[in-house]
Amino acid sequence: MSTQSLSHVQKLFLKYQHILVFIAPVLFIATVFTAAPLPADAGTDYWLQYWWLFPVFVLGATIVNTVGISGSALFVPFLIFIFPIFAHPLEPATLVKVGLISEAFGLSSSSIAFIQYGLVDRRLALTIVGGAVPFVVGGALLSFIIPEVVFHTLLGIALLAAAYLLFKADLDHEEPGSHADSGQATAADGGTVNLPNDPGKLGPAGVRTDDNGTVTRVDREGGDYRYNRGGYLRRFANYSIGGTFQGLAGFGAGELGIISMLSTKVPVRVAIGTNHIVVALTAILASLVHVFGGGLVGGHSLSLASTPWNMVVFTVPATVLGGQIAPYVSNALDTDTIKNFVGVLFGVISLALFLMALGI
């Protein structure tokens, strides 16, 4: 296939990505109905038992994808504290698995939406994911063998750290340059500079890396961003810790990832978009380990039959929908306000987890 043909296919995919993205949960639900190991008495009451999770997870997915953090950071505490009020308590490994499976679909949906906007540095994302893989796997395997009290304590510590990091992070969107009309941007000396324009992307979007490592990225709306990919070691340190918690509790990579990218001068919108790819891939990996990996460490084995399918058939499409909404909310609302709200919520939840661990 020629380069021109590949470019055409890519552009068509980005243009109609919302249709393709919504096919994924339909196929997932169809697979669950036809192939998943289900209880013998799985009838209409079984499948409709948790319908009310759909609006809850739409809202949660929209919030976390707008800020660029892990969905399980909200989903897991919700399943610990709120879900038992209306249903029944879940085992730690089970609730993490539900959160991760839902998050994997939601973040994948949102990642493609941010790629459509031209706000994802794929080279940066794949490098980070490669370094985080062993820590994600290790954290996921650890979740099978640690006591529930330790799990709640570590979860509280992770949320408290995430709250601090969110308050510290400046997520106000900087105003990008604009060349939507002329294809040019004003240079420092008053002249003009050419900006990349990739025919395989929507609008004037494109990306170019100069010989000195400076990246010039143009989004779908014509805004341009300049940065470099330096600071790999600092990001690796943050993502190794975050990856461990991502596997253990279902979140951590997103929160520490945003901080590490901003500290290495990656523009806010590019950092949020790129972080979606990182968290989506690590969530998918952690989900697979949580489903299949219990027996590898001598812990309890979570078979497919133990998955509450009547929950995930509602949470998966909900997070996909929230992931598609997030880029529009991110452009329309003050991200700093959402960030502060989530930070306060994390602080309250972490306190409740510490009290639970103490048996109070």
Image (spheres, rainbow, N blue to C red):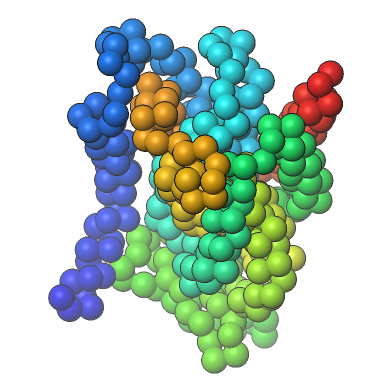
- Outermost residue on the left side: it is 1
Nearer to me, 242 or 198? 242
Residue 66: horizontal and vertical position, in percent? Answer: 57, 42
Residue 225: horizontal and vertical position, in percent? Answer: 58, 68
- Outermost residue on the bottom side: it is 211
Nearer to me, 324 or 357? 357
> Residue 57 vs residue 309: left or right?
right
Residue 158: horizontal and vertical position, in percent? Answer: 74, 44
Q: Quadrant of the N terminus?
A: bottom left
* Picture residue at 49% right of the left edge, 51% below the top: 296
* Picture residue at 65% right of the left edge, 49% below the top: 245
> Residue 330 vs residue 289: left or right?
right
Residue 227: horizontal and vertical position, in percent? Answer: 62, 74
Q: Quadrant of the C terminus?
A: top right
Q: Quadrant of residue 82?
A: top right
Q: Is residue 348 above or below residue 224?
A: above
Total numbered labels: 0
Q: Is residue 202 visible?
A: yes
